Amino acid sequence: MTMHESRYFWQGEKVRLRGVSINDWEEWFEDFEDSDAIRLLNWGIELPKSVEIAKAIFAEWADFKDTSNRIMFTIETLDGEPVGGINIHSKDEKNGTFSFGIRVNRKHRGKGYGSEALRILLNYGFYELRFQKCNSGCVSINEASIRLHKSVGFVEEGRQRRSIYMNGQYYDHILFGLTREEFDSAFHF
């Protein structure tokens, strides 16, 4: 069954996307101690977060209160267990482009949750928000992110050499792009 034939738009075979809940802070907060993943996601180490800050962050994004800058989702299994988060950001309506951010918690990685969540999000971006291209990127040592991009059809469009500094070294920034037509071709829409 393709996404266009699915009974529930926001659900795949393994995961569904739902709005962020105020209570999602706990799963995120626990995973925040994964410094290696945080470094690859944020291109550096952030200062420690308090419980109060974590709750405030989730209160800000809960229930799609403000979608002008980011549209935030929780990724959960079909049994309702939160496994990560995904969002649309950098929306450029004039040029029809957007980007995304994704995080799958350590204990849930390698199960295909991220790629399925990304396909659902891309389907929304291309077919409901009318965007024509998704631009993305990652640090060159983030092998999981590179695999994820390629698994849903992203094309490497370039590389900014030595533009990310973290952990005492400079790394390349890999630029990826995916057009709606490439997405259609990859998933036979």
Image (tube, rainbow, N blue to C red):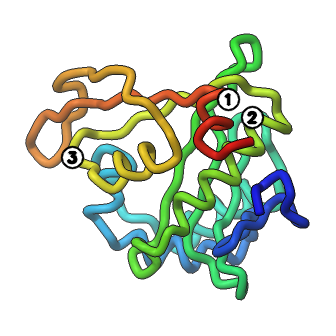
Please indicate whether residue 146 sits to the left or right of residue 66 in the image. Answer: left
Mark 3 lies on residue: 141
12 lies left or right of 86: right
Between label 3 and label 2, give the one nearer the viewer.
Answer: 2
Say which residue appears at 23% left-offset and 25% top-offset: 163
Expressed as whole percent of the image width and height from the top left, the position of residue 116 reads 60, 61
Residue of label 1: 180
Foreground of the two, 57 or 71: 71
The amino acid pointed to by label 2 is Phe
Q: Secondary structure at mark 3?
A: loop
| Left or right of 64 on screen, residue 147 | left
Badge 1 amino acid: Arg
**Picture residue at 48% right of the left edge, 33% below the top:** 136
Looking at the rendered structure, the kind of residue marked 3 is: Ile
- Tell me where residue 128 sits by quadrant: top right
Residue at label 2?
Answer: 126
Q: Nearer the viewer, residue 104 or 33?
A: 104
The image shows residue 53, relative to residue 46, as above or below, that is below
- Whether residue 90 is visible here, answered yes or no, is no
| Pointer 3 with pointer 2, Cβ within 8 A | no
Q: Earlier in the sequence, mark 1 or mark 2?
A: 2
Of helix, strand and loop, which one carries label 1? helix
